[in-house]
Image (cartoon, helix red, strand yellow):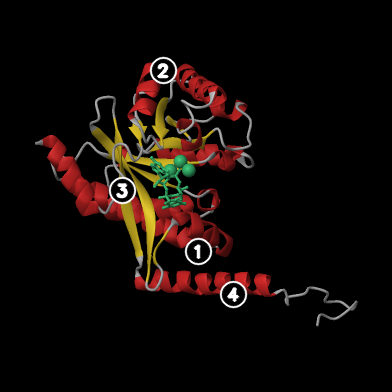
Amino acid sequence: QAKAGGRSTICFFDPAMQAALLVRVKLEADLRQALENHQWQLYYQPQVDCVGHFTGVEALLRWQHPERGMVSPGEFIPLLESTGLINEVGEWVIDAACRQLALWATKPQLRELTISVNISPLQFRDSDFLGRLQQIFVRTKAPLERLKLEVTETLFVEARDAARDKILSLKAQGVRFSLDDFGTGYSSLAYLAQLPLDQLKIDQSFVQQVLDSSANAAIVESTIALAKSLHLDVIAEGVETENQKAWLLAHGCHAFQGYLFGRPMPVGEIEAALLAQCS
Ligand code: C2E
Ligand code: MG
Ligand code: MG
Ligand code: MG
């Protein structure tokens, strides 16, 4: 029974709430273990041009949990963010992607590929972020003009100038920037013109409804037009059907990512798929 009145009135005796809390506490402990035991892995999902040739990949984090199997990022990224562990894991992700780029740079058939890496706003805002990246760049000797960082609109809601400065300093080294999940955030469009971005990524929620909802079709059309007038590349994510692809092509979007072209896969599989395409 919770104390009535007094100073501590928080009640932890709701069984459902307690169970949820326990799951969270366990998951958090597991995450710390995962950091020590290297249970992380990068999967890569192809990005293709209008004729279906692979131009690059997006690196997507996977957690191989000893008991639960593969845990999806939707479940653990928020937890990494709320515990501050995102900086450490995010650094591992960038390092792994840069090592992969350096390796591919030595292989004639793979050297042109780009790797896109998702960056959490918390990680980007960290005062050590640029310093950590610099060390990784020096250590891995990755070709930085093949590295793309995917950021989201949330990053620009506050401290926009600081974010802009960081982007500019990375761009000076060749790194490119893509705005992920475009259209799902809460910020105004005005920031877009002021930011030195390279690519807009149309969110999959719009892409998947493009043939079923005229409102979504209108959003996708205006996103493509906006990208054109701001001289940004545009890529559609979550493309699952030929019809969606045909619609996008007809409306001026020439780069795609989605299950239609390939699921996220381990590095061996992605290399095999890429090499098969070259031969
Ligand atoms: P995102 O960056 O928007 O990545 C695209 C997500 O959509 C991926 O989910 C991908 O597997 C999925 N997807 C791709 N094509 C299709 C499709 O045709 N249909 C459907 N239904 N889904 C598709 P995933 O791998 O579960 O990642 C979810 C989110 O977790 C990512 O969304 C990203 O925000 C975050 N995330 C993943 N890896 C990292 C990472 O290394 N760092 C950070 N900070 N976030 C990450
Ligand atoms: Mg992404
Ligand atoms: Mg996305
Ligand atoms: Mg998404």
Q: Position of residue 133 (x, y in %)?
A: 40, 51
| Amino acid, disc 2 | His
Nearer the viewer's eye, disc 4 or disc 3? 4
Q: Is residue 37 visible?
A: yes
Write down the residue under mark 4: 22
| Amino acid, disc 3 | Tyr
Q: CA distance from mark 2 to mark 3?
A: 27 Å
Q: CA distance from mark 4 to mark 1?
A: 19 Å
Q: Mark 3 and mark 4 in contact (Cβ < 8 Å)?
A: no
Q: CA distance from mark 4 to mark 3?
A: 32 Å
Give the residue furthest to the right: 5
Q: CA distance from mark 1 to mark 3?
A: 22 Å
Q: Which mark is residue 85?
A: 1
Q: Mark 4 and mark 2 in contact (Cβ < 8 Å)?
A: no
Between 73 and 160, the one lying in front of the other is 73
Q: Which mark is residue 170?
A: none
In primary-sequence order, the first of circles 1 and 3 is 3
Q: Position of residue 69 (x, y in %)?
A: 37, 67
68 up-or-down from 277: above or below: below
Write down the residue under mark 2: 251
Count of marks, rendered view: 4
Write down the residue under mark 3: 44
